[in-house]
Image (spheres, coloured by chain):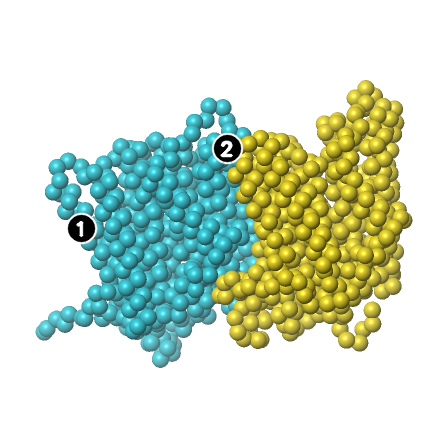
Amino acid sequence: MSLTIPSIHYLAILPVLILFAGAIVLLGVTALVRGALRTSVATGITLLAAAGAFAAGFFQWANLDRYGPSTTIAHAIVLDGFSVVASAVIAVSLALATLVAHDWFRREGVRGAEYHILALATAAGAVLMTQANDLIVIFLGLETLSIGLYVLVAFDRHRGASAEASLKYFVLGGFASALFIYGAALVYGATGSTNLSTVSYFLGANVVLRPGLLYAGGALLLVGFAFKVAAVPFHQWSPDVYEGAPTPVTGYMAAVVKVGAFAALIRVLISALGTQITTWRPILWALVVLTTIIGASLAIVQRNAKRMLAYSSINHAGFILLGVWAASARGSAASLFYLATYAPVVVATFAVVTLVGGPGDERHSVDSYRGLARRQPWLGAALGILLLSQLGAPLTTGFYAKFAVLAAAVDGGGGPLALLALLGAAIAAFFYLRWTIVLYAESPEGAVSIPVPRATALAIGAGVAVTLVFGVWPGPLATLAQHATVLFTS
Amino acid sequence: MHSSLWLTVLVWLPLLGAAAALLARRRPGAPFAVAVVTASVELAVSLIVAVLYNDHLAGAHTFDFVGRWVLAAPFGLAYDVGIDGISLLLVVLTALVVLLALLGAREKRSEAAFVSWLLMLTTFTMGSFVARDLLEFFIFFELTLVPSYFLVAHWGGAQRSRAALKFFVYTFAGSAFLFTGLLYLGFLHQHQVGGSLTFADAALASTSMSHATAVWLFVAFAIAFGVKSPIWPLHTWSPLAYAEAPTAGSMELSALLAKLGSYGLLRFAVGLLPLALSTVRPYMLTLAVISIIYGSALAAATPDLKRLVAYSSLAQMGFVTLGIMTGSTIATTGAVLLMFNHGVITAGLFLLIGYIERRRGSATIANLRGMQGSAPVLAGLFTVVMMASIGLPGLSGFISEFLVLVGAFSTHAWWAVAATLGVVLAAVYLLWAYQRIFHGLARDVDQVPDVTHRERWVIAPIVAIVVVLGVFPKPVLDRVTPTAHQFVESVTPAGVTK
C-alpha cells in the first residue's frame, strides 16, 4: 500500500503558512532570548506576519484573475475571491488588535510573547476556515481558532473574571465543537463524503429518500456555527465571555471569530447544502429574527459597556445571517461586505473601551464614559463615530453594510424579514444613542483624562478612517466584495 | 435648463460652513460669524435659484437644475439633484429658517458645536429636498436625525435626553418601513427592466406592479412619512421633542423636518405609487381629519406654549396631508403652499416663544400674564403671526388653507367639512392662549422689556412674508401651479377628471 501525497498549491495556503510561520518564529525567539521577550519585538513580528498574510492576498488575487478559482490538497482547500477577501479582513483585524494589545501590555506590565503567538495561531485557524472545502478542515480551523482563544480569554490571570470567562467559553465552545463534529459525521453518513463539493454533487445527483440522517447532521452543524457566531438562542456565553476577557482580546475575537465562522457557514450552507435550501431557510429565518431583535433588546438593560457591545455584536450577527439567508451571490457578497466593514470598527470600538477601562481593566460601566467627549474631544468623537457606524447611520460603512444585506434579503423575497431585522436595528439605536448622550454629557467632578498611547490611537484612527472613507465612498469595497463572490466555487 | 452646480452649492456649502465654524472654535464669536455668513450666502443662492427657476420647462418629471452621477453601482447609489415647483419653495424655506434660527435663537453654550450641527442639518435637509433619487433622499432623510438628535440632546430643556431618544428611535423605526419598501421597489424595477439597480425617481415611477403591491408599499412609505410629518396616531414623539428642544431646534423640527414627511408623502408615496391611491385615499384623508381635530383639541388643552405649537403643527400638517391626498391640482398647490407658509409661521411662533422664554424663563401659559402693557410690540408681532396661523384673510395662512379646503371640498366634501372645524378650533386655542399670555392684570414679574432692535429685525422677514404672500401670492403660485398640475396629471389614471 502506498501513500499518495496530494499535490499542494502553495500560493493557496500562503497566508496560513505565513501566520503559522510568524507564530513559530516567535516561539523560537522566546526560547532563545534570556528572560522575557520585549513586547515591541513580539508586536513587530506579529505585525509583519499580518502584513505578509495581507500582501499574499494580492498575489492570490492576481492568480485568480489569471486562472480562476481552484481547489488544492485533494480539494480540501479552496482558493477563491471570497477566501482572499475574508483572509485579508482577518489579517487587518489581527494587526489592529495587536496594536491595541501592545499598549495594553505596557499598561498592565505584562511581558512575553505568549499572547502574540496565540493570536497568530488563531488567525491562521480563522484563515483556514475561510478556505476550507471540507468539513474536517473547517473543524481543524475551528479548533485552532477556538483553543487559542480559550487561552487568550484567560490571559489576564490576575482577574478572576478572566479565568471564569475562559472556563465558560471552553465548556460551551467545546460542546459546540462536539456538536459540529458529530454533525459532520452524520453528513458523512448520509452522503458518503465530508468534502463540500462532493456533498453538493451527491445531493444534486441523488434524491435522498430518507433524509433524517442528513437533516440531523445539517442541524448539528448549524447549531455548532450558531454557537460560534453567538446567534440567539445559542448566545448565552457571549456577554459573560466578552465581559470577562481582557478587552483587547474581546475586540479581536469579536472580529476574527465572526469572519471565520461566517465564511465557513456560507460555504457549508450555500456550497454543500445548497440543494436543501427549502429546509434550512426557515430555520435561518427564525434565527435572524431572534438574533437581531433579542440581541438588541437585551442590550438596552445593560449598564456595562462590554456586555452592551456583546449584545450589539449579537445583533450584528443577525444581520450577517440575513445575507446568508438570501442564499444568493448578492447575499454572500453582502455578508462578506458586512464582515469586512464590521471587523475594523469593532476592533477600534474595543480599543476605546480598553483605554477607558484603565489599569486593571475594571472601569467598564457606562458611567465611566460620562463627559468623555468634553474632556477629550478626539477620543470621544472617535467613539461617537464608531457607535454611529454600528448603529448604521448613513455616511458610515455601517449603513452600506446594512443596506447590502437588506437589499440581498429583499431581492431574495425576504421583505418582511428585512423589516423585522430593521426594527431590531431601531431598538439597537436606543442603546448606541444612550451611550453617545453619556459621552457628551457634563463631565463629572474630578474626572481625569485618559492617556491615549500611540499604537492604540493608530488602531482607533484606522477604524474610524475605514468607516468614514468607505462610508462616503463605498464603491471600491462593494465592488471588491461582489467580485469576491463571483469567483465562489461550489 | 440651468446647471446643477447651483444646487450642489446649496447642499454642500453649509457643510463647509460647519467645518469652518469648528476650525474657528477657539476664537469667541468667530463660529457664530462664520455660520451667519454661510447661512446668508445660502439664502442668497436659494433666492437666485428661485428667480432663475424656469417654470415653463419644469413639470412633474421634467426638473430644472438637474444632474446625476452614479456613485456606487452595486448599491444603485447615485447623487441626483434637480428641483421643480414643489421643492423650490422648500429649498427657500430651508435657507430662510436656518438663518433666522441662527440669528434669533443663538445659543452661547458650546457655540461652535451648536452652529455646526445647525449647518449640517441644513445640508441634509437641503439634500433631501433636491434629491431626485429615492435612495439619495432616504440617506439625507436619515442623516437629518443625527444633528437634530444632538441639538435636542445637548441644548434642550430638562427632559432633553428622553425627548431626543424618543424622537430618534421613533423616526428610525418609521424609516425601517421606508427602507424595506424602497429596496423592494428598486428590485421590482430591476427585475422588470434589467440592468443595474437604480432608485432614480423617473425610473421607479415607470415600474408596473399589482394593486396590492402598490398598497403595501404605500402603507410602508406612509408610516415613515407619517412619523416625521407627523400624522395621528404616529405623532406622539413630537410634543415632547418640540417642547424640550432649544428654540432653534424647535424651529428646525417643526418648520423643516416636518416638511420632509409631507414632501416625501407627496413626492414618493403619491408620486411613485399612484396605483394605491384609490384604496388608501379614504383612510389617509380620515387620518388627516383626525390629526386636524385631535391636534386642535389638544392644543387648546395643553398648559405649555411650545406644546401648543406642537399640537397646532399636528393640525396644520393634517391640512397638508388632506391637500396631498385629495389629489386635485388646487388642493396639491394649496398643500405645497401650506408647507411653506406653515414653515414660516411656526418658525415665527417658536421665535416669539423663544423671546418670551428669554424674558420670563418659562413657556408655561399659567405663569404668563398681562405682558401686553410692558411689551406692546411683542404682543403686536405675536398677533400678526398668530392671525396668519389662524388663517385670517389677507395673511398667508389663509390662501393655502383656502386652496386645500376648496380642492378637498370639490372631490371629498365630507372630509372637507370636518376639516373646516379645525379652522374654527385654531382660532379658539390661539386666541385663548393669547388672552392668557398678553391680557390680564400684569404682576411685577410680568413687567418685561419689549423686543430689542435685533429681535425685531429677525422676526421682520417672517412678518413681511406673511403679509406679502397674504396679499400677493401670485409669484409663488405661478411657480407651484404648473408643477402641481403636471404632478396630479401624472398620478391620476386616464379617464378620471380632476
Left or right, residue B304 beside residue A334? right
Looking at the rendered structure, the kind of residue marked 2 is Arg
Answer few, some or many: residues within 10 Å of disc 2's Cα (few below 14, many 20 plus, some between 14 and 19).
some
| Along the viewing direction, whichever of A228 and A192 lies nearer the viewer | A228
Question: Is residue A167 visible in this depiction of the protein?
Answer: no
- As drawn, the label of residue A374 is 2
The yellow one among the chains is: B
- Asked whether disc 2 touches disc 1, contact meaning CB atoms under 8 Å apart, the reply is no
Instruction: Residue at 39% x, 47% y: name it.
Output: A462
Which shade is chain A? Answer: cyan
Instruction: Residue at 62% x, 40% y: name it.
Output: B35
Answer few, some or many: residues within 10 Å of disc 1's Cα (few below 14, many 20 plus, some between 14 and 19).
some
- Mark 2 / mark 1, whichever is N-terminal: 1
Question: Is residue B324 visible in this depiction of the protein?
Answer: yes
Spot occupied by residue B229 in the image (x, y as percentages of width and height): 70, 51
Seen in the picture, residue A62 relative to A438 is either above or below; the reply is: below
Where is the N terminus of chain A found, in terms of image quarters?
bottom left
Q: Chain of mark 2?
A: A
- As drawn, the label of residue A24 is 1
Instruction: Residue at 25% x, 52% y: name it.
Output: A49
| Along the viewing direction, whichever of B110 and A333 lies nearer the viewer | B110
| Along the viewing direction, whichever of A28 and B74 lies nearer the viewer | B74
Secondary element under disc 2, as helix, strand or loop, is helix
Q: Chain of mark 1?
A: A
